[in-house]
Structure formats: structure tokens, C-alpha cells
Amino acid sequence: MKQLLVDGVKFIFGNPGTLEEGFLDALSDFPELHYIIGLQESVVIGMAMGYARVTRMPAIVQLHTMVGLGNAMGMLYEAHKSSTPLVVYAGEIPSKFASFDGFFAGDLVDTANPITKWAYRIIPGDDTLKVLRRAFKEALTPPQGPVFLAIPMDVFEEEIEPDIHPTSCVHWHMSPPAEDVSTIVQGLMEAENPIILIGDQVQLSGAQEEIRKLADQIGCPVYGADFTHQGNVYHSDPLFMGTLEFAYSKYNHPVTNNADVVLAVGTSLFPEMFPNNGPYFRQGARLFHVDLNPWEIAKNFPVELGIIADPKATLEAISAGIELHRNPEFQKKAAERKLCWQQKKKEEWDAVQIKYDHLRQARPMHSSLMMKTLVEMIPENAIIYDESITSSPSLVHYMNTAKPALYFSSRGRCLGSGWTGAVGVKLAFPHQHVLAVSGDGAALYVIQSLWTAARNNLHIIFLVCNNRSYRILKLNMLEYWAEEGMELRQFPQHDLDYPVIRFDEIAKGFGVKSWSANDPDSLRSALNSALTDTSGPHLIDVQIEGAVTEEIQSIMGNK
Ligand SMILES: Cc1ncc(C[n+]2csc(CCOP(=O)(O)OP(=O)(O)O)c2C)c(N)n1
Ligand SMILES: [Mg+2]
């Protein structure tokens, strides 16, 4: 515990069991360390991820041996893929009983290995502090990620020398070699249609301003590739064109194939579910990739230049190079391009707005009307945690015009990171409004997070985008039927309409005040109440349209 304290730890996220009782008992002597209990392990990891993502410090997690780890695995996979720093500890049966193959016997380290950056069993007890510091350091060193420690009960109880000192962390703000910077500067200045693709390392390295500046200098669009939060850029930035789709790469192809020079910064290329065999980049396109994670560079595509370096330092150097070499011809080209992209962004926004305007009177209301109402009411400095799946595009659409609120989204791998993540964020930023927007389906994976919020009096507004379905799966099914040339038929297991799920009643059962809304007025009034009463969490169950009539027409045609 003392080691955790010198490393600045304030919270431990966990769910207890007999094998960790020594740990929990010792914790009682350290009131500065707050134990945040989650009632299911995916909730525990989700909350820890939210906390780690905003603080960029490893969040400490305690799980109950193999069964706790088993329940946590989906979310741990999410943490691993999204490079979220966690130090996860699970108790293990006493090492002297390992061969007995009794209750809870099993290899935790082997189980955790594929979904963590490093997994290790601490034996003997003397190694505990050294290994804990190493785990902390590993979680924090790029590529960041979850680290797992199994500690057998007897090892935990050994008396050890309290050799406590802060973990030595690795500085990773490496500048790129000057000749590499020159190559990129030259490439960008010669380009006709450059683009910048960014991932979450922009926020990690604090390169937000540098991305904006470079995009402005060369007049080129910025697209999110492996992009989960607005810590990277604001949706309202004039050259931020949005996030590339990750499920159907055909939507991305026109974007990436248009570019003759691509600068990828701190991102996986690409986090696709169904990679397409077609060309991702046009013939002869020049690809430069700057990343703190060497694994991501040239992983799927040949690069002209791949650099392991700090995105911030690299972008600063590139900008300085452009400043130095710019000439009137380049500046004219850059200014024209900038205008063109800004115009394109505006036209695309207007086209979507016209569509949303037509849907204004629809009841149940369309998700766009819910999001318009919500964004209008977002207070200054609020944080939005978005896992609203098919309602998310309309939230992002209105975020484009909004005052910059901090926006996080889930990548959609393990459902449930939205509501749980919001709990972690609120613990990190207790004085900011936190709104957690989730699909009805996603919320139900982690419904117990409501109880943790209530138990800790966290003022979080949980919003359910209640379309009574796994709507995204319907859209994906339509794509599948269309691709396979099949007829339209009954959607399999995609409806959540019977029996009716009463989120308002469930919330009350967890000690959370709740509201129902089915039009802008009732939503506004529920939000008003929820924003005013800051004594604890609120849930607003918002009834929205779930039908996919329009998509049936556009995807399936007349079938
Ligand atoms: C743990 C987990 N289980 C299942 C899935 C598969 N899945 C992806 S999206 C989805 C439905 C989401 O529904 P909802 O949150 O209601 O959003 P909607 O599509 O209705 O907008 C499901 C079940 C998943 N990604 N993660
Ligand atoms: Mg739904």
C-alpha cells in the first residue's frame, strides 16, 4: 500500500474474494487509498479504464482469482487493444497447494497473458515491491497497456523489507532525427492532396495544438483512425473531418485513396473489423508513420518512412521545417486546399442537417433530436462519455458546432466501457459535469455501474438511448444480406422490446434518481433537474426511434 501511495495512487478498483482478504484487510489501514467496488468484474475494469484514460496514470485493479479474471477478460482485452495503462492484481491459491488442484486452481498468468502487456506470478514475497514497480513502469511505457500480477495468498502474507521508493518511469519524448524530419517536410510540401491520420497518442503526447497547427499550415484534412477521444482534437476544429469507419472499410477507401501523401500519427492502420482486400492507398502514395509503438509501424502497409518518436516533438519539428521552407507557391496551394476542405466539411454537415430537419416531427423521436437537445444543454466544461452506438453519429454531428466539451468514445469492441468509463472519469474530475450516453444494449452489460455511482455520490448523468434493440446488429445484418445477395427476412435476436426493460425502475433499485423522456421537452426538463441536483447520479431513459426502415431502402434496395 505504501508503494502505491508513493506512486500517487488514490483509488483501487476491485471486487473482493477470499484469496484477496489479506489485501483488503491491509487496505483498511490506509484511508488515503479509496476502494471503489464494482459488482461485476467488467464494471471494475471499465471504471479503471475511464480513470486511466483521463489521468494517463495506471489504474490499480484487484480481481478475485480465476473467476474474477474470467469475468474481466472482455474489458481487459479492450484495455489491451486501446493501450490503457492498468495494473491488475488477482489473488491466487497458496503456492504450496498448487499441486493439489483444488478449489480455484488454475494458471492465472497463462490466462491473462494474451490480453495483457505483461503477466507475472510474484514468488517469492521479497520480489513484491520490485515487481510492482516494474508493473507500474511497464503499464506506463508506450505502448501503454494492462499488466497482470498473480499473487499467491501465502506470498502475500510474507513479511518483507519495506524498501519503498517511487517507480522510475521511462521518458519517451524522443525527437526524430533531423534528416527524417526533412524527408517528411519535403513530402508534405510537394503533396497535392496530403492527409493526416491520427490516433490516441496525440493526446498521450500532448500534441493537440501541433496537429491543428500542421493541418492549418499545409491546408490538409485530419481524420481519426484509431481515435477514441476528443482529447486529440475537437470535432469543431475546421480541418477535423471526423473518424474513419472501422467496420466497413469501403467507406474509408475514397478518403485514403484520395491522398498522395499520408502522415499517420500515433495510430493503428487500421483498427478494422473486416479488412478489405482492395487497395487502402493509391498506387505510389507516400506513407509516413510516426508512432511510439513500433508494432504499429509498417504493420499492414509498406511505409516510406516509419519513425519511433514522440508525436509532439515530431510534429513541432515538421512545422518548424515547413515554416522555414515555405514559399509563395506552397502557401497558395495550402490556402486553397484549406478553403476547399473547410467548405467540404460545411457542405457535409449541412447535408446531414437537412436530413435531421426532416425527421424533427418523428415520434418516437429520432436520435438526432435527442442529441440536438442534449448538446444544447451541455454545460461549459462538461465531459461526455459516448457509447451510444447508432445514435453516436448524431451526437458527433452536433458536437461539431458545440463549445468544446471533452468527449470520449468507446471503440465498440467490448460493450460497457461507456457508463463504467464515466464513473472513472468522474472520480478523476469530481468538479466537472459528466454525462454518460449509452445504447440500451451496451448499458445492460454494466448496469451495476449505477450502484457504484450511487454508493460514491457521484454526480453523473446516465442517458439511455433506448431504441429497444441491438440496432447496429440490424444494420450489419442488412449489409450482410445485401453482400450475400440474400432476401430481407426476420432479424434474429436483435430486439430488446419484450419484456419491456424499465431502466427508470432499475435505476431506482440501485439508489439512482431516474427520469423518462420521450420528446425534447421532457428531455430538457429531466436534464434540468439532473444538472441541478448534484448530490448523486441520475438516469434519464430516453425513448428514441429504433426502426431501420430507411436503411432497408438504402442498403437492400427493393428486395
Ligand atoms: C461484450 C460484448 N458483447 C457483444 C457485443 C456485440 N455487439 C456489438 S454492438 C451490440 C449491440 C449494441 O446495442 P445498443 O447498445 O442498444 O446500441 P444500438 O445499436 O441500438 O444503437 C452488440 C450486442 C460486443 N461488442 N461486446
Ligand atoms: Mg439499442
Image (tube, rainbow, N blue to C red):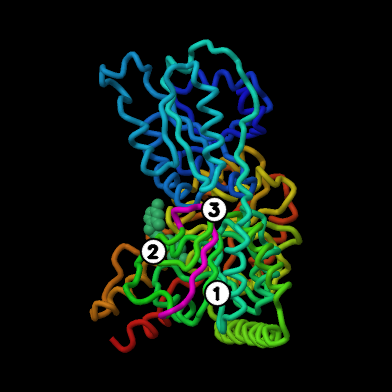
> Label 1, on which residue?
365
Amino acid type at mark 1? Met
Q: Quadrant of residue 435?
A: bottom right
Mark earlier in primary sequence (3, 1) = 3
Q: Position of residue 128 (x, y in %)?
A: 51, 21
Does residue 543 lie above or below 415 as drawn?
A: below
User: Is residue 143 part of the magenta span, yes or no?
Assistant: no
User: Taking 441 as reference, is 376 left or right?
Assistant: right
Tag 2: amino acid: Asn
Determine the residue positioned at 40% across, 47% down. 74
3D distance between C-alphas at marks 1 and 2: 42 Å
Where are the magenta residues, as a range? 283-296
- Secondary element under disc 2, as helix, strand or loop, is loop
**Is residue 327 rendered to the left or right of residue 442?**
right
Identify the secondary structure beneath mark 3: loop
Q: Say if 237 sits above or below 536 in the image.
A: below
User: Residue at left 46%, top 56%?
Assistant: 442
- What amino acid is found at the position of numbered circle 3 in the picture? Leu
Extreme top residue here? Answer: 159
Residues at circles 1 and 2 in contact by the CB criterion of under 8 Å: no
Compared with residue 55, is residue 486 higher up or lower down, i.e. above or below? below
Marks 3 and 1, Cα distance to the nearest angstrom?
44 Å
Residue 467 in view in this figure: no
- Mark 2 beta carbon near ligand 1 (under 8 Å): no
Q: Which residue is mark 3?
A: 292
Q: Quadrant of residue 369?
A: bottom right
Query: Where does residue 441 sit, x and y in percent of width and height?
Result: 44, 58
Residue 300: which numbered mark, if any? 2
